Image (cartoon, rainbow, N blue to C red):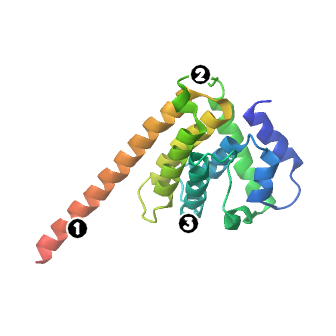
């Protein structure tokens, strides 16, 4: 069963609100990548997400840290695992992630170097991008720039695809460079303003 089909089945089985812990358990021991994709899915669009970046980013960073340390599956912190999502919100997330996966799965397969599809390597990428997502500073399209590499890391975990892992690292590098350039621009603007006021 493909990852998109697993999400569609989970969507069909929904009845009422669920916690992220329930969702993680429903996805099973092989669902680490799917959970990463689900947490990244709300940010794969350019519209504001009403302060969700910080909690979602911290959840992803903690989960990625667990994978980096060699945990057999993605473990959410207790506070995150107990976070309850209403049925309508969860259905939107599942369907958005399912559509993205259906497109991406057309070119994924088990391939590439072992290090690029290693859960520990991918966990490091998830942790780094989770921290970048959690930074409480607005950057235009910054959340989307973080979410795309996260989705690719999740896809690499699901499909054991080193090419998706490599694409995720390239996307992560581009995302960090974009954030750094934006921060430098803001800093230069502040210095120019200070010089005018002096």
Q: Which of marks 1 and 2 is nearer the N terminus?
A: 2
At a point 80% along the width and 30% down the height, the residue shown is: 1
Placement of 140 over or under 122, stated as above or below: below
Q: Earlier in the sequence, mark 2 or mark 3?
A: 3
Q: Which of marks 3 and 1 is nearer the N terminus?
A: 3
In the image, 69 versus 73, the foreground residue is 69
Q: In which quarter of the image is residue 57?
A: bottom right
- SS for callout 1: helix
At a point 59% along the width and 59% down the height, the residue shown is: 56
Placement of 139 over or under 196, stated as above or below: above
Question: In the drawing, what numbered circle is on residue 51?
Answer: 3
Would you say the residues marked 3 and 1 are in contact, meaning their CB atoms lie under 8 Å apart? no
Q: Quadrant of residue 59?
A: bottom right
The residue carrying pointer 2 sits among few (fewer than 14), some (14 to 19) or many (20 or more) residues within 10 Å by Cα, namely some
Question: In the drawing, what numbered circle is on residue 111?
Answer: 2
Closer mark to the observer between disc 1 and disc 2: 2
Task: Give the labeled residue for mark 1.
Answer: 190
- SS for callout 2: loop
């Amino acid at each position: 069963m493909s990852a998109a089909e697993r999400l569609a089945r989970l969507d069909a089985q929904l009845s009422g609100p669920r916690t992220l812990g329930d969702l993680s358990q429903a996805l099973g021991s092989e669902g680490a990548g799917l959970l990463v994709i689900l947490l990244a899915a709300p940010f794969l669009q350019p519209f504001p997400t009403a302060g969700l970046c910080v909690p979602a980013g911290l959840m992803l960073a903690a989960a990625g840290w667990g994978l980096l340390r060699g945990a057999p599956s993605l473990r959410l912190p207790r506070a995150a695992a107990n976070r309850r999502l209403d049925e309508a919100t969860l259905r939107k997330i599942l369907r958005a992630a399912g559509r993205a996966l259906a497109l991406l799965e057309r070119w994924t397969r088990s391939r590439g170097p072992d290090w690029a599809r290693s859960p520990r390597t991918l966990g490091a990428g998830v942790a780094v991008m989770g921290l970048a997502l959690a930074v409480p500073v607005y950057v235009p399209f910054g959340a989307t720039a973080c979410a795309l590499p996260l989705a690719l890391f999740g896809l690499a975990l699901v499909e054991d695809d080193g090419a998706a892992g490599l694409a995720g690292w390239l996307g992560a590098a581009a995302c960090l460079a974009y954030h750094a350039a934006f921060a430098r621009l803001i800093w230069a603007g502040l210095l120019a303003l200070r010089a005018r006021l002096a």
